[in-house]
Amino acid sequence: MTIPTPSDGCSARVPARDKPREYCGVFGAYNLPNAAELTYYGLYALQHRGQESAGIVSTDGDQLYIHRDTGLVVDIFHKPETLTSLKGSVAIGHNRYSTTGSSSRQNVQPLTSNFKDGFLAIGHNGNLVNTLRLRAELEEQGSIFQTSTDTEVILHLIARSTYRDPAEKIADALNQVKGAYCLVILINDELFAARDPRGYRPFTLGRLDEGWVVASETCALDLIGARVERDVEPGEILRIGRQGLQSYKPFPKKQLQQCVFELIYFSRPDSRIFGQSVDRIRRLFGRALAREHPAQGADIVISVPDSSNSAALGYAEESNIPLELGLIRNHYVGRTFIHPTQSIRDINTRIKYNPVRGVLEGKKVVVVDDSIVRGTTSRRLIRMIRQAGATEVHMRISSPPIRYPCYYGIDMPTRSELIGSSHTVDEIQTYLGVDSLGYLSEKGLDALGTLDAGNHCMACFNGNYAESFEKNFQKTMYEDIQPSLLVGEPPNP
Ligand code: SF4
């Protein structure tokens, strides 16, 4: 039997790009009269976590109301009647990246289904690492899959569970899967939120009036005026229904693996995740970077906006070098801008960033960026900065070199495409055309004791994956994983 190439709850290989991409954002609202509208605003705040499709599913307890499509949140829900048609006081929503082509629409989440106990909807942020076998077994037993997502495996496992109670059904299903997940689930008129025991992705719980909300990041709660209560804890299933809020912890405790890249790059700086202010942590990374890799004699520090702004501020503060706006980012670049008929050098980079000549001319410049993936965009940026008159360019990166792909919900190129996996720092410096290059070390990431050492995943830097993988990973989307990296599940503490 041929098993379709699986993708994560919301992932697929995508065209070449030079930044890792978050796969998804999730949001849920309970006991709020305008639940769908609030979910819309929540998804709007989480747009950076997935920009190719979105969906909202609401319920009044009698039936599900569904609207999903490809595109940005504002485009999908631009008609007021779309939101008013999503009735009820309970809703979940989802932003995602998706494949191009015919399969993309059917993979748009939340996924929905009717089953023997009523109706079910689910949205997933993360990536499971053991669903090939589960999917094959389910298909052998007659299950028919509508999508190529691993989220649908969870949907089937919940629907087929022999437990009677919905929370037990969810626990039964999640006990069979491994990997990263933050889930929003509707079962009839109840809202559930579940986070994997290692806590890879951020997930927060908030209160609004008499209702409850859950979201990938606190910035979504801020936008709707909700109060942050606490994180959905790793290994926790929250049930929000007529009985109020109930918490279940049905899984064995595991060593935490909170994604350090959420702090470095993905999450919004105005969010608090893993109990930390993202902006504060990024500034501390910038300070540590300045101590590890000073740039004596430099005139100005500039950031590669926007994700590097906080780290650049930290670098400038620590080194006493003024921060300047040397690059301006165009925020209105669509994913499909029309390419010029005549070749314009570096058009893909120029369309997004423009150097400020008056700031850069005659200056020795420190450029702070958060990460380098392929290096192609950085190389073009450096060329533009030099053309704008910079006399020296010193690049500083507020993370260690990315050497390994991520299998826990972040879309990265294959290992061979990661410049950090095959080139030394000196070689990368030469390739980029900079006068010096410095990466923050792993130790530096934790230099200020902010990371609660040992509780964060750094696998894309050091290859220490916490979850073992199915053997046939190599033959599918995980073709580039090295056998030596297939590590076993550590014993439960
Ligand atoms: S491998 Fe990197 S991007 Fe993936 S979860 Fe770990 S730290 Fe985050």
Image (cartoon, rainbow, N blue to C red):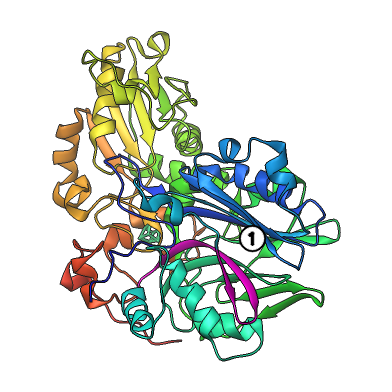
Task: Report if residue 114 lies within the magenta region.
Answer: yes
Asked whether mark 1 and ligand 1 are closer than 8 Å, the reply comes as no
Residue 389 seen in render: yes
Q: Residue at x 34, y 20 (%)?
A: 350
Q: Is residue 308 left or right of residue 361?
A: right
Q: Is residue 397 left or right of residue 89?
A: left
Above-or-below relation of 356 to 410? above
**Amino acid type of the residue tagged 1 in the rendering:** Thr
The residue closer to the viewer here, 388 or 364, is 388
Residue 28 seen in render: no
Q: Using the rendered view, name the quadrant where residue 170 is placed.
A: bottom right
Q: Residue at x 42, y 46 (%)?
A: 288
Above-or-below relation of 363 to 298? above
The residue closer to the viewer here, 466 or 251, is 251
Magenta residues, start to end: 112-130
Task: Report if residue 341 lies within the magenta region.
Answer: no
Q: Position of residue 186 (x, y in %)?
A: 65, 68
State ligand 1's quadrant.
bottom left
Q: Position of residue 284 (x, y in %)?
A: 50, 46
Indicate the quadrant containing the N terminus: top left, top right, bottom left or bottom right: bottom left
| Principal secondary structure, stretch drawn in magenta | strand
Q: Position of residue 383 (x, y in %)?
A: 24, 21
The residue closer to the viewer here, 99 or 264, is 99
Q: Position of residue 403 (x, y in %)?
A: 24, 54
Q: Is residue 166 left or right of residue 373?
A: right
Determine which residue is flagged by label 1.
204
**Total marks in image:** 1
Q: Residue at x 13, y 40 (%)?
A: 427
Q: Using the rendered view, name the quadrant where residue 478 is placed.
A: bottom left
